Image: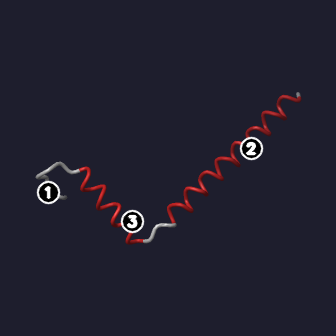
Amino acid sequence: MKWWKWLGLAGVVGVAATGVVVARGERQRRAYTPEEIRSRLHARIEEAQEPGESPR
């Protein structure tokens, strides 16, 4: 029965590690100012468009 305990502990550690990764990503996303986000989105739109194509 000991292996069930180890399996449960591994599951708890996995959930905690996932939470840490999600929290880190959220902090990085919130670090951008609205102007930075807007400029990055505009740059991505320009990259995605082919020459001569008009924006939607």
At horizontal 31% and vertical 55% (from top left) the residue drawn is 44
Residue 12: x and y, percent?
75, 44
The foreground one among 46 and 13 is 46
User: In the picture provided, is 56 more to the left or to the right than 15?
Assistant: left
Query: CA gap, disc 3 to disc 2?
Result: 34 Å
Residue 7 is marked as: none
Crowd class of label 1 (few under 14; some 14 to 19; many from 20; radius 10 Å): few
Amino acid on which the number 2 mark rests in the picture: Val
Disc 2 element: helix
Q: Are marks 3 and 2 in contact (CB under 8 Å)?
A: no
User: In the picture provided, is 1 more to the left or to the right than 53?
Assistant: right
User: In the picture provided, is 11 more to the left or to the right than 37?
Assistant: right
Disc 3 element: helix
Amino acid on which the number 3 mark rests in the picture: Ile
Crowd class of label 3 (few under 14; some 14 to 19; many from 20; radius 10 Å): some
Residue 13 is marked as: 2
Q: Earlier in the sequence, mark 3 or mark 2?
A: 2
The residue beneath circle 1 is 54
| Quadrant of the drawing holding the C terminus | bottom left
Amino acid on which the number 1 mark rests in the picture: Ser
Q: Quadrant of residue 23?
A: bottom right
Q: Quadrant of residue 14?
A: top right
At horizontal 29% and vertical 59% (from top left) the residue drawn is 43
Query: CA gap, disc 2 to disc 1?
Result: 49 Å
| Quadrant of the drawing holding the N terminus | top right
Disc 1 element: loop
The residue beneath circle 3 is 37
At horizontal 53% and vertical 60% (from top left) the residue drawn is 28
The residue at the far left in this view is 52
The residue at the far right in this view is 2
Residue 50: x and y, percent?
17, 48
